[in-house]
Amino acid sequence: METMLIYPSFQIACRNFINYIKSPEINFKIIDKTWALKKIESDFAQAQFTYMDGITVKLPGYRFNVRASNTEDLLRFNGEADTQELYDEMIYKVTSLMQEFM
């Protein structure tokens, strides 16, 4: 008796998903966390924002989240991009912005 495969294999199903370049969590020691988050909003004004856990910034090709630590003077950054070039651009922009507050 021949077994019929009803569902495609996991590997075939995963081909439709895009692989993103993901950053590790990067911590920035920031004393005025509120002002730094407002600066992100103004510097990335063309982006879409959500505010569920900190601020999530979505732009074509990359997205990132920055949230304030409740116990330390830190902003925690996590991001992902579609390409290495966009990843490098995102990291450069966010790091440059954060250095203004360090």
Image (tube, grey):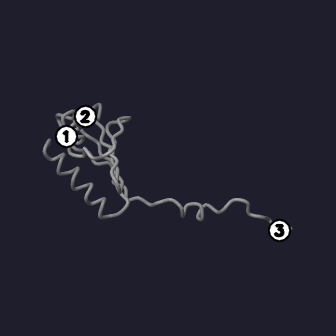
| Helix, strand or loop status at disc 1 | helix
Q: Of tags 1 and 3, which is closer to the observer?
A: 1
Q: Nearer the viewer, residue 87 or 31?
A: 87
Give the mark nearer the N terminus: 2 vs 3. Answer: 3
The amino acid sitting under disc 1 is Lys
Q: Quadrant of residue 91?
A: bottom left
Mark 3, residue position: 2
The answer for how far apart the CA atoms under marks 1 and 3 are is 63 Å
Q: Position of residue 9 (x, y in %)?
A: 64, 63
The answer for how far apart the CA atoms under marks 2 and 3 are is 61 Å
Give the mark nearer the N terminus: 2 vs 1. Answer: 1
The amino acid sitting under disc 3 is Glu
The C terminus appears in which quarter of the rendering? top left
Q: Position of residue 12 (x, y in %)?
A: 60, 65
Q: Residue at x 34, y 48 (%)?
A: 58
The answer for how far apart the CA atoms under marks 2 and 1 are is 20 Å
**Local crowd size for mark 2, using a 10 Å CA cut-off: few (<14), some (14–19), many (≥20):** few
Residue that sits furthest to the right in the current view: 1
Left or right, 61 with respect to 3, comes to left
Mark 2, residue position: 72
| Helix, strand or loop status at disc 3 | loop
Give the mark nearer the N terminus: 1 vs 3. Answer: 3
